[in-house]
Amino acid sequence: MDQSIDWVLNALLPTPAHVGEMVLSGLGTVITQPMLVTKTLVMHRYEPVAPVAASDLLGRPVLKLPNGFTYARWIWKTHGVKTLFTGLGATFTSNLAGEVAGRMLGKVLAPFLEVKPFRSTVSPLVADDYLKRVRAGELEPVFSPLPTTFGEHLVRFGKAWTMRMATMMLRVAISYPAAVVRARMIAQIAGGETIYTGTVQSLVHIARREGFCGLFAGLQPSLLSNAYLVTAGLIVPYVLECIAERRDIAARQQRRDQARHHHGGDGDEDEEVELNEHDGDLDEDDDHLSQEELQELHFQFLAGEQTRRLYFVAIEYLTQPLGFALSLVSSTMKLAGSELALAPKPRPATWQECWRSLSAEGWTAAGLLRGNNLVWRTIPVAPSTATF
């Protein structure tokens, strides 16, 4: 019983490094909430500012809509600055619920999957905290031997993918009711409704009016979108990391061969032991790292994190259209059962029907990419044919 309580407390109580990340994440949430409000209203086709005639890069006539900052300034002047932070409580609730659920599931799956953090997926704060705890004797610096065959690489990737996918799905599912509440609270701005006044009140109202399923309207496309982005964002960095690891092993082997050649090939036993200690990562039975190797690995963590972020930004930019289109369908379905003015009409029965309606406009700012770009927003001069 005591062990179970300790496990739950360890899962729920974050380390100081994680607390620092959560504080920074909370500040980022507050700062970006106005843009989230703006983006949500744009995604639901609320355009209070009339577009102006313009032309695109090819000289074709288009209608230019206000960018996100102009849109947010209009909301500020019309409804007040408080409106720009509508749904902030629901956002915090959604993020916190997803973070706690994901951490607890990660602790459950880690012993079974034997997942060790990749060099390119550990944040600098966590890596620094890990290094301090190892030096303080709280943790033992033991790492798995590097994969040497394609099968081992595939198994390692499969474990990491399973861990990421499972924690992502649980995070999305647990945080989704609060995300539905946030979307509806923001959508009220368009019609001036006051149906959803708080997170708890909104959850109870939706459950009573639409049933339990109403709290998860549009969950399927949201899961598909996140699964697609997780898979795309994991494959390329992992392949590049595997290449870097093989080069690292080859370089270590070359240094070992050169050192042995320098000592005449046979050397005494002490020299052989010294070589084995210097390149311990090459030995399957020597997985313990020295303080110097741990320090080097820590810097690799820091460099790998920056590289990973660049890779993720590039991959997200290239794969964003499909992921965003699924997110737009999910966001539309969040309002499908509500009585709000921005609710889609007629109400789509399934998310596939919602996709077909939105795809009538194609992959444009008026169709499946509505709200994808808040910097340069244009729509064709031709009238819209989408139902919602």
Image: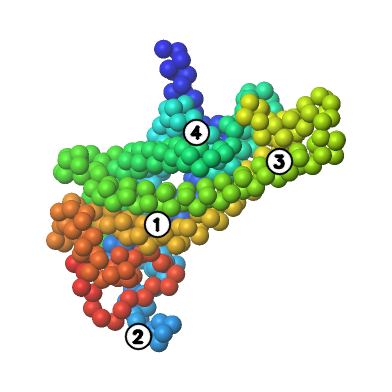
* Image-based side of 388 in relation to 5, left or right: left
Structural distance between the alpha carbons of marks 3 and 4? 26 Å
Mark nearest the camera among 3 and 2 is: 3
Structural distance between the alpha carbons of marks 4 and 2? 54 Å
**Residue type beneath disc 1:** Leu
**Residue type beneath disc 3:** Gln
Q: Is residue 170 above or below residue 185?
A: above
Answer whether labels 3 and 2 touch (C-beta < 8 Å): no
Q: Earlier in the sequence, mark 2 or mark 1?
A: 1
Using the image, tell me which numbered label, if any, was put on residue 115: 4
Mark nearest the camera among 4 and 2 is: 4
* Image-based side of 280 in relation to 32, left or right: right
Structural distance between the alpha carbons of marks 3 and 1? 51 Å
- Residue 3 point in image, percent of width and height: 46, 15
- Residue 150 point in image, percent of width and height: 51, 42
Q: Is residue 214 above or below residue 69?
A: above
Residue under circle 3? Answer: 253
Using the image, tell me which numbered label, if any, was put on residue 53: none
Residue under circle 2? Answer: 61
Q: Looking at this view, is 270 or 77 the one in front? A: 270
Q: Is residue 380 above or below residue 226?
A: below
Q: Earlier in the sequence, mark 3 or mark 4?
A: 4
Answer whether labels 2 and 1 touch (C-beta < 8 Å): no
Classify mark 4: helix, strand or loop. loop
Residue under circle 1? Answer: 36
**Residue type beneath disc 2:** Pro
Quadrant in which the C terminus appears:
bottom left
Q: Looking at this view, is 254 or 102 the one in front? A: 254
Q: Earlier in the sequence, mark 4 or mark 2?
A: 2
